[in-house]
């Protein structure tokens, strides 16, 4: 009886071991399949990035506008922005009348963003100007630049906040105010807040 019991235990252990081996083999097959799928996905991502770069290059050849970035103060001093323009920009950027309650009043309505959305060629031109200004980043491409916020165009001057994969910003939070033309502008992050204007316009 003891031998029969030990034999039964051995059979059960052998079965568990064989099941474990089969489970291990199945698991390995799944891992291999996932690795192969991941590899194909990485190749596809690389392919899409190459296609995206080609698309940007093609768009560049179709009529990229050369432009320059200016601070709000520079644009105001040059006469491209009026105090009313600055009030609208501040309203959009500050998230309301905060800091400008006295000059805006309770019922203030900013100028509508015109155009409501930046056209693709102007967007590309802004991003290319940003890349051109990153002299240390020879491989900087417009595809690595993002227009995080857009506050409208005023006399062909586009108010934008830019970000990119090429710049690392400090992690600490800021809360600084700047007065331009009697209007308070709040700087609450390190992103590039600029006015972009095409050359010769």
Image (cartoon, rainbow, N blue to C red):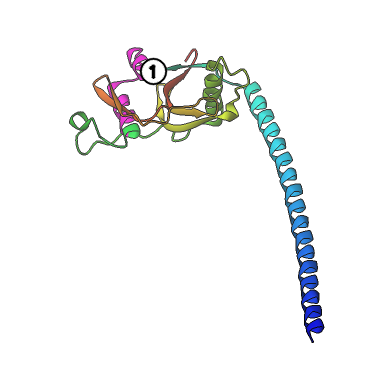
Quadrant in the picture for residue 14: bottom right
**Residue 116 belongs to the span the image colors magenta:** no
Q: Nearer the viewer, residue 24 or 3?
A: 3
Q: Secondary structure at mark 1?
A: loop
Q: Residue furthest front?
A: 2
Residue at 25% x, 35% y: name it.
97
Q: Residue furthest bottom?
A: 1
Magenta highlight: main SS: helix
The magenta span reads: 72-91
Lateral position of residue 166 relative to residue 14, left or right: left
Q: Nearer the viewer, residue 45 or 62?
A: 45
Residue at 77% x, 72% y: name it.
13
Quadrant in the picture for residue 128: top right
At label 1, counting other C-alpha atoms closer than 10 Å, the crowd grade (few under 14, some 14-19, many 20 or more) is some
> On screen, 54 above or below 36?
above
Residue 21, x across and y down, in percent: 79, 63
Can I make out residue 111 in this image? no
**Residue 84 belongs to the span the image colors magenta:** yes
What is the quadrant of the N terminus in the image?
bottom right
Quadrant in the picture for residue 127: top right
Lateral position of residue 47 relative to residue 182, left or right: right
Can I make out residue 87 in this image? yes
The residue that label 1 is drawn on is 71
Q: Nearer the viewer, residue 67 or 116?
A: 67
Residue at 60% x, 24% y: name it.
141
Residue 42, x across and y down, in percent: 71, 41
Residue 152, x across and y down, in percent: 40, 30
> On screen, 23 above or below 173?
below
Residue 54, x across and y down, in percent: 69, 28
Count of labels in the image: 1
């Amino acid at each position: 009886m003891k031998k029969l019991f030990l034999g039964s235990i051995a059979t059960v252990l052998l079965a568990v071991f064989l099941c474990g081996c089969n489970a291990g083999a199945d698991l390995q097959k799944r891992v291999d399949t996932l690795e192969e799928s991941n590899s194909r996905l990485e190749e596809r991502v690389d392919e899409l990035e190459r296609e995206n770069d080609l698309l940007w290059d093609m768009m560049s050849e179709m009529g990229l506008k050369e432009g320059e970035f200016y601070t709000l103060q520079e644009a105001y001093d040059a006469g491209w922005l009026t105090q009313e323009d600055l009030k609208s920009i501040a309203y959009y950027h500050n998230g309301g009348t905060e800091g400008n309650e006295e000059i805006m009043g309770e019922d203030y309505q900013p100028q509508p963003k015109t155009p409501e959305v930046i056209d693709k060629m102007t967007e590309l031109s802004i991003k290319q100007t940003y890349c051109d200004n990153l002299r240390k980043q020879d491989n900087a491409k417009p595809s690595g630049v993002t227009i995080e916020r857009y506050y409208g165009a005023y006399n062909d001057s586009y108010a934008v906040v830019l970000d990119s994969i090429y710049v690392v910003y400090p992690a600490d939070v800021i809360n600084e105010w700047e007065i331009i033309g009697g209007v308070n502008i709040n700087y609450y992050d390190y992103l590039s807040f600029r006015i972009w204007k095409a050359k010769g316009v």
